[in-house]
Image (tube, rainbow, N blue to C red):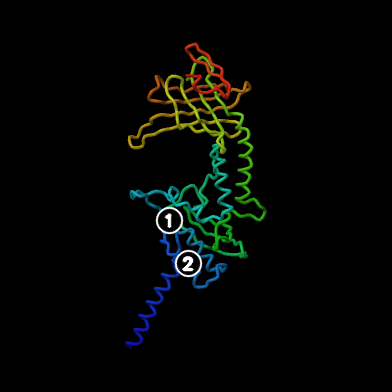
């Protein structure tokens, strides 16, 4: 009896040591995004192309989705705002590269790449969100398909495509299609259209000055920074400036924005918003909204800017070429 108990104790010690060593053979700290069980299964000789392993891999990938997380101060935040980048961790390299480039393009054009969250299959996630692998099929050396049953307020069936790279499986598409109308095609088309818009945006590079009989005496300077238009100057003559204004251009409409809100005191510090388009004269014409603590009055109304020209209300006029220095205005 004692001999049998001793064998059981010895077996337990050896099994525990084996799991610890196999689960973290690199010696690195295991984070909450790592799967100790997945590493252990792999090191034990389980085929990574087996259905059992792929199911476990999907469980690892989706285990943090739809669950609340907490910031460094213990405040609950949505997983969407979690600093852990789920896309870079669990998407294939080619899919993530396309996604990043498409996101950069959308930041330039002011478009939204996705109007829903592809991880939870919705724009929001319910408290009882859940995901279950329904089927694993069409497994090859480099690809596989997985059907998922997702509960998010209601039950949804969806399919994801996997790609085997870096010695494991990664999501290569959230909406695979045999006719080619998948996520990657959408991302490539977004990038292609965005590159055309980027070329059009080059015509807006330069100084743009206020013209008219009424309105804020605005001087706006736009430059290309390699990733679209950049606002390098946004000043109201002799009054105040906006140092962090950003621009987006969708091929026809330009939007320049800056908003500073004091969350601690729950008040708006200042705001600048200008939506404009090129009119038949080549001027930027649109609506402008300005709120600033230094302003003698806030402004909300029409505004016209002309390239290379600035007119002061006090009677002085200044014509500008795009290569003139800003100190000529002062």
- Residue at 47% x, 51% y: name it: 85
Query: On the rendered structure, is 201 left or right of 264?
Result: right
Query: On the rendered structure, is 301 left or right of 307?
Result: left
Q: Nearer the viewer, mark 1 or mark 2?
A: 2
Decide: marks 1, 2 in contact (CB < 8 A)?
Answer: no
Q: Which residue is mark 2?
A: 39
Q: Which residue is mark 1?
A: 128
Note whether 17 is above or below 135 in the view shown: below
The x and y percentages for residue 140 are 62, 65
The x and y percentages for residue 54 are 54, 65
Residue extending farthest right: 179
Numbered disc 1: secondary structure: loop
| Image quadrant in which the N terminus is located | bottom left
How much space separates mark 1 and mark 2, taking CA atoms? 28 Å
Counting residues from the start of the chain, the first of labels 1 and 2 encountered is 2
Please state which of residues 124 and 230 is positioned toward the viewer in this rendering.
230
The x and y percentages for residue 241 are 44, 26
- Residue at 42% x, 62% y: name it: 28
Disc 1 residue crowd, few under 14, some 14–19, many 20+, Cα 10 Å: few
């Amino acid at each position: 009896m004692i001999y049998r108990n001793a064998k059981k104790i010895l077996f337990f010690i050896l099994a525990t040591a084996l799991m610890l060593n196999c689960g973290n053979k690199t010696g690195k700290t295991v984070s909450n995004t790592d799967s100790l069980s997945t590493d252990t299964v792999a090191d034990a000789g389980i085929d990574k192309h087996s259905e059992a392993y792929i199911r476990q891999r999907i469980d690892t990938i989706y285990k943090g989705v739809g669950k609340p997380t907490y910031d460094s101060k213990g405040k609950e935040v949505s997983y969407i705002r979690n600093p852990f980048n789920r896309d870079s961790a669990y998407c294939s390299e080619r899919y993530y590269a396309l996604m990043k480039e498409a996101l950069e393009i959308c930041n330039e054009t002011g478009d939204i790449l996705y109007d829903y969250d592809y991880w939870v299959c919705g724009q929001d996630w319910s408290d009882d969100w859940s995901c279950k692998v329904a089927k694993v099929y069409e497994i090859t050396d480099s690809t596989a398909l997985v059907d998922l049953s997702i509960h998010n307020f209601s039950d949804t069936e969806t399919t994801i495509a996997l790609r085997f790279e870096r010695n494991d499986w990664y999501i290569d598409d959230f909406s695979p299609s045999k006719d080619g109308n998948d996520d990657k095609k959408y991302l490539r088309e977004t990038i292609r259209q965005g590159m055309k818009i980027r070329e059009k945006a080059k015509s807006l590079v330069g100084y743009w000055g206020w013209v008219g009989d009424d309105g804020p005496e605005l001087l706006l300077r736009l430059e290309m920074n390699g990733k679209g238009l950049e606002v390098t100057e946004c000043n109201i003559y002799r009054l105040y400036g906006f140092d962090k204004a950003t621009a987006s251009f969708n091929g026809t409409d330009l939007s320049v924005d800056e908003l500073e809100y004091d969350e601690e005191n729950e008040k708006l510090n200042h705001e600048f918003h200008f939506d404009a388009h090129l009119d038949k004269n080549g001027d930027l014409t649109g609506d402008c909204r300005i709120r600033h603590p230094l302003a003698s009055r806030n402004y909300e109304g029409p505004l016209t800017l002309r390239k290379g020209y600035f007119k002061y209300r006090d009677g002085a006029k200044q014509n500008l070429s795009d290569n003139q220095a800003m100190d000529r205005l002062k």
